[in-house]
């Protein structure tokens, strides 16, 4: 049966005096300590090295279908855009470029939502963790900011903690956009003849373009909001540390600031 200790792979003479037994007092202290893993399934998962797969990306499925439908439109439009849109050549080029741009944005959105949903762990983020939200870091800032913004602004909702996660809450809008784009692909596909020439006019193609742009705006707006909110949160927490150092200053700190190192700004605030 798997065990946490067994995973360590200890292989040495346990009777050797170097591997001494803990004292009764030490064992009593261990017994009095709260459990690190209060649930039995936590112990089992750790013992069995089964510690991945706890999180899912709630928008992953709709991403997959939007990506597939948009890729079909792009592939068909990009076959020979110079010749395949006899009734709307410029609109054909615009459709190709718009679909390609949306595919890029979709991939960025998928990566972002993997990060904030915990599918991609902060430990795997590398230098990106400094500027982009991950579940652990965004919640770390957010839980503190709930306390801080309640004290400073009376905010009594979860927005300080969830402001970097809004991309996870638009699944219904994504589904609606996907339905429209799927129908656009049906319309576009039915307009093609055997040589992949599109018989749609400019107005019809522009309608498809506008649908893709609307979906693009939705996901880029949400992703940009989450990233900006995270970066703002990090800055507020850093700035909090700069002003919090002046709370409960001792006499030595106060004298040093008032008489030697404090700027006029600081001295005026300390004595206000």
Image: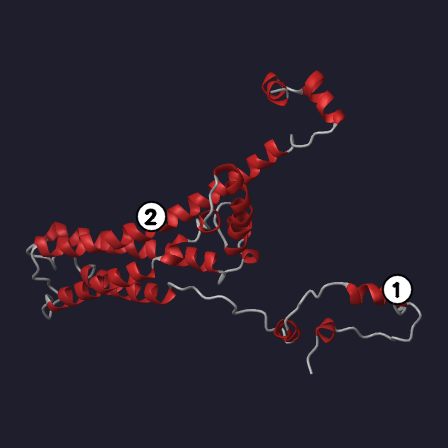
Q: Is residue 109 left or right of residue 16?
A: left
In this view, the residue in front, 13 or 49, is 49
In terms of image quadrants, where is residue 256? top right
Label 1 neighbourhood size at 10 Å, few (<14), some (14-19), many (20+)? few
Q: Position of residue 55 (x, y in %)?
A: 49, 66
Number of marks in picture? 2
Question: Residue at coordinates 52% horizontally, 69% vertically from top-left?
Answer: 53
The answer to whether residue 101 is seen in the rendering is no
Q: In what element is the residue under mark 2?
A: helix
The answer to whether residue 185 is above or below residue 125 is: below
Question: Residue at coordinates 53% horizontally, 54% vertically from top-left?
Answer: 125
In this view, the residue in front, 126 or 109, is 109
Earlier in the chain: of badge 1 and badge 2, it is 1
The answer to whether residue 43 is above or below residue 153 is: below
Q: What is the spatial separation of the Cα atoms under label 1 and label 2, in whole angstroms? A: 59 Å
Q: In what element is the residue under mark 1?
A: helix
Q: Is residue 206 left or right of residue 103?
A: left
Question: Residue at coordinates 51% horizontally, 48% vertically from top-left?
Answer: 142
In terms of image quadrants, where is residue 190? bottom left
Quadrant location of the N terminus?
Answer: bottom right
Question: Residue at coordinates 50% horizontally, 42% vertically from top-left?
Answer: 233
The answer to whether residue 9 is seen in the rendering is yes
Query: Which circle, 1 or 2, is nearer the viewer?
Result: 1
Q: Position of residue 197 (x, y in %)?
A: 10, 63
Q: Which residue is mark 1?
A: 25
Q: Which residue is mark 2?
A: 221
Q: Position of residue 147 (x, y in %)?
A: 55, 45
Q: Residue furthest right?
A: 17
Q: Position of residue 93 (x, y in %)?
A: 17, 52
Quadrant location of the C terminus?
Answer: top right
Q: Residue furthest bottom?
A: 1
Q: Is residue 33 left or right of residue 96?
A: right
């Amino acid at each position: 049966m798997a065990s946490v200790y067994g995973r360590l792979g200890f292989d040495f003479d346990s009777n050797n005096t170097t591997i001494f037994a803990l004292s009764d007092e030490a064992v009593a202290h261990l017994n009095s300590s709260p459990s690190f893993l209060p649930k039995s399934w936590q112990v089992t998962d750790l013992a069995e090295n089964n510690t991945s797969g706890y999180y899912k990306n709630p928008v992953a499925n709709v991403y997959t279908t939007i990506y597939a439908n948009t890729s079909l439109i792009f592939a068909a439009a990009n076959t020979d855009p110079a010749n395949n849109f006899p009734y709307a050549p410029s609109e054909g080029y615009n459709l190709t470029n718009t679909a390609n741009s949306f595919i890029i944005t979709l991939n960025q959105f998928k990566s972002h939502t993997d990060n904030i949903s915990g599918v991609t762990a902060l430990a795997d983020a590398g230098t990106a963790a400094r500027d982009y939200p991950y579940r652990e870091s965004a919640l770390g800032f957010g839980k503190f900011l709930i306390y801080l913004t309640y004290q400073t602004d009376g905010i009594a909702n979860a927005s300080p903690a969830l402001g970097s996660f809004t991309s996870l809450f638009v699944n219904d809008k994504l589904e609606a956009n996907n339905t429209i784009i799927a129908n656009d692909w049906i319309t576009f596909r039915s307009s093609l003849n055997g040589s992949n020439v599109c018989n749609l006019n400019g107005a019809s193609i522009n309608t498809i373009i506008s649908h893709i742009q609307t979906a693009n705006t939705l996901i880029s707006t949400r992703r940009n909001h989450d990233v900006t909110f995270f970066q703002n949160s990090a800055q507020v927490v850093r700035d909090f540390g700069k002003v919090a150092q002046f709370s409960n200053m001792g006499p030595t700190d106060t004298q040093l600031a008032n008489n030697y190192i404090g700027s006029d700004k600081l001295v005026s605030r300390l004595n206000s």
